[in-house]
């Protein structure tokens, strides 16, 4: 065995506190949803008519709550459950989950819905009204009903504040007087007041249709962490006191954000700290170090990275590495491009040209992932300066490299 193989093999064989690490990730749907049973019941009450009188009205509900309060996972669980129950009753109901952080325009949303329903629509050449008509006509032919969850809908509203696409969505059947109303909505937002951007004619539809997701209290977070740790970690690697400590740090009633995502992220990072030091258990120091690293805004940014294309991730990684190398708050565009070309060689990717890179950067700026500004006093020559305000660079670099490794070189 070679010198390098010994190093790698040693790490591969090293013990881990994780049994099934992915069960601590936001994408994982657990078998139970502690402290969200009430919201599930409210959803079931609101969508009863899908079974009793399908197509008689367009049903809609708003799920509202801050980051990490279980809105997305509750919607997904409800969607999977209600479609299974509908199938048993002979109703062809499909659930489609659209991330509006990624699909920010009305045409993009319509195409995401059509893809989720298995309906092929032209990518170009049709107006939104024509796309919607094609979607509805196909559903009518196939006798299909849809429950559409529009997640991160705040971003959609902010990105389209001048055009009011919400009106088009909720008043859909004002223009298409078909016999049955086959589309129903779940709008997922952090603050329901964002819907007021659409004007009274649209926002008035939701006055009585809001299900609140309050921040988790420490005792509630403990219940969540206890269940997820039981699924993801080997027995005995974290003490009950350790789980309670995370819950106290993050519980809303104890001054924390009340975010389950943040609490679970702390547990992941604490486990990784234990693994790095080849210890078979998670200590309080591991948790303290993880809590310093994990901030709500950092966890949010890491969620957003999932929606980036491969070369957008490569340019983001280039910004991170350049900032680390220079030790500055901002990096020149030219420096980032040089790093980007080297990273592309490492990943065996053909580097994009300057114009395309600038397009990527402006997109990430608009999404709040990067900061970009023109150089001013103190800089020789005119340049675009790039920065990151979303968390520790080491953690961001690690997360991006994990995402790139998952997509393959």
Image (spheres, rainbow, N blue to C red):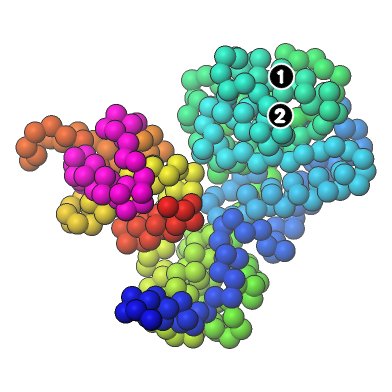
Q: Is residue 353 above or below residue 6?
A: above
- Residue 51 lies, in percent from the top left, at 89, 39
Was residue 358 drawn as part of the magenta stretch in this picture? yes
Q: Main secondary structure of the magenta part?
A: helix
Pick out the residue farthest to the front.
Answer: 1
Q: Is residue 143 above or below residue 349?
A: above
Judging by the rendered image, the residue that carries numbered circle 1 is 134
Q: From mark 1 to mark 2, how far is it between C-alphas?
A: 9 Å
Q: Quadrant of the N terminus?
A: bottom left
Quarter-of-image position of residue 22: bottom right
Residue at coordinates 49% horizontally, 20% vertically from top-left?
Answer: 162
Residue at coordinates 71% horizontally, 34% vertically from top-left?
Answer: 118
Disc 1 and disc 2 in contact, CB within 8 angstroms: yes
Q: Earlier in the sequence, mark 1 or mark 2?
A: 2
Judging by the rendered image, the residue that carries numbered circle 2 is 119
- Left or right: 282 in relation to 96: left
Residue at coordinates 68% horizontally, 37% vertically from top-left?
Answer: 116
- Residue 256 lies, in percent from the top left, at 48, 63
């Amino acid at each position: 065995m070679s010198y390098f193989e010994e190093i790698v093999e040693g790490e591969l064989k090293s013990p881990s506190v994780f049994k099934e690490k992915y069960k601590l990730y936001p994408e994982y749907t657990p078998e139970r949803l502690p402290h969200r049973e009430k919201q599930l019941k409210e959803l079931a009450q609101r969508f009863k008519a899908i079974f009793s009188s399908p197509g008689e009205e367009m049903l809609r509900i708003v799920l509202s709550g801050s980051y990490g309060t279980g809105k997305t996972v509750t919607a997904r669980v409800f969607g999977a459950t209600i479609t299974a129950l509908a199938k048993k009753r002979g109703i062809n109901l499909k659930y489609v989950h659209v991330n509006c952080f990624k699909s920010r325009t009305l045409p993009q949303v319509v195409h995401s819905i059509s893809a989720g329903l298995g309906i092929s629509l032209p990518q170009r050449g049709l107006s939104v009204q024509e796309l919607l008509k094609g979607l509805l006509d196909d559903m009518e032919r196939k006798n299909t009903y849809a429950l559409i969850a529009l997640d991160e809908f705040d971003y959609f509203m902010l990105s389209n504040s001048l055009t009011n696409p919400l009106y088009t969505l909720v008043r859909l059947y004002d223009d298409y007087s078909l016999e049955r109303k086959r589309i129903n909505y779940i709008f997922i937002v952090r603050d329901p007041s964002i819907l007021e951007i659409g004007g009274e004619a649209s926002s008035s539809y939701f006055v009585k249709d809001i299900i609140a997701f309050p921040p988790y209290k420490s005792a509630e977070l403990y219940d969540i962490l206890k269940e997820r740790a039981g699924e993801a970690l080997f027995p005995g690697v974290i003490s009950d006191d350790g789980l309670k400590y995370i819950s106290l740090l993050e519980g809303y009633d104890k001054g924390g954000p009340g975010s389950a995502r943040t609490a679970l992220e702390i547990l992941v990072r604490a486990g990784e700290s234990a693994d790095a030091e080849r210890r078979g258990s998670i200590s309080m120091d591991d948790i303290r170090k993880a809590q310093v690293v994990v901030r709500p805004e950092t966890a949010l940014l890491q969620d957003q990275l999932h929606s980036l294309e491969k070369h957008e991730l490569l340019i983001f990684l280039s910004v991170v590495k350049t900032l680390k190398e220079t030790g500055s708050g901002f990096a020149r565009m030219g420096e980032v491009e040089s790093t980007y070309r080297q990273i592309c060689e490492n990943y065996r990717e053909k580097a994009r040209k300057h114009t395309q890179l600038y397009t990527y950067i402006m997109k990430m700026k608009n999404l709040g992932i990067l900061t970009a500004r023109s150089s001013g006093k103190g800089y020789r020559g005119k340049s675009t300066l790039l920065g990151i305000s979303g968390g520790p660079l080491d953690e961001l670099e690690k997360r991006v490299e994990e995402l790139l490794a998952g997509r393959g070189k």
